[in-house]
Image (cartoon, rainbow, N blue to C red):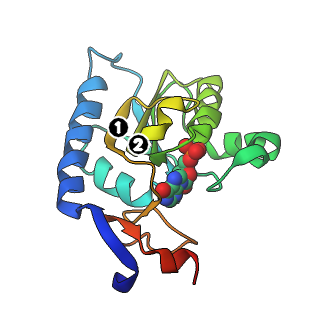
Amino acid sequence: MRDDIHRILIPGEMIADRVRQLAAEITRDHTPPRVSGEAEVTIVPILTGALVFTADLIRAIPLPIKINLMTVSSYPGQSVRSQGVSVLSEQLRDVKGRHVVLVDDILDSGQTLATVKPLVAKLGAASVKTCVLLKKQLATKAAIDADYVGFEIPDEFVVGYGLDFNSVYRNLPDIVVLKPHVFAP
Ligand code: IMP
Ligand code: MG
């Protein structure tokens, strides 16, 4: 796996610092009086990419949060919109009346968050915020922006810290760019 890495874009230690800052921002924004005392917080990681990020993020948020897992296929395109909405609502049992923070690994076209965010709102969430570890610079043209962004990165394909290529490399501790031979073996 190490032989496939072209360069490290964001080292794990830098990610750890930034994740703690994001957690502090989320905590501040979800502590009364910024939110009403009754409505509590549900973190919704969009799996599988947000798995590693969310695991670190939630351990730095000292609030009584709940976690509601949901899955969206990596490149949703039309399929999620045509057949996914009922599947998605079923997965979102725990959002009614709560302050929801949607967590994803990366904001690219914005398609994923633009699909899920209105759905969570429609299911009766008290508020919906979005948090991504990475945002591609091209994403200024994206369908939606995120409320919390870890790092803005160039428009390059990256893996590690939850992000995959062909379902591999999610367990790398750094965000890296792969060598070309990986894509054209
Ligand atoms: P969006 O819906 O276009 O914003 O795409 C977001 C999803 O596409 C992410 O959750 C990732 O699963 C995938 N994705 C986009 N860019 C990359 C990348 O550079 N590496 C790995 N996955 C990516
Ligand atoms: Mg993903």
* 53 relative position to 45: left or right: left
- Quadrant where the N terminus sits is bottom left
Report crowding for label 2: few under 14, some 14 to 19, many 20 or more residues within 10 A (C-alpha): many
Q: Is residue 87 visible?
A: no
Task: Report the residue at 23% width, 27% height from top.
Answer: 28
Per the image, the residue denoted by label 2 is 132
**Amino acid type indicated by mark 1:** Val
Camera-side residue: 32 or 77?
A: 77
How many dots with numbers?
A: 2
Task: Report the residue at 31% width, 48% height from top.
Answer: 58
Up-down: is 53 above or below 150? below
* 3 relative position to 63: left or right: right
Q: Is residue 148 visible?
A: yes
Estimate the x, y position of residue 185 in percent, counting from the top left: 57, 84
Up-down: is 78 above or below 25? below
Estimate the x, y position of residue 124 in percent, counting from the top left: 60, 23
Question: Quick one: SS at disc 1?
Answer: strand
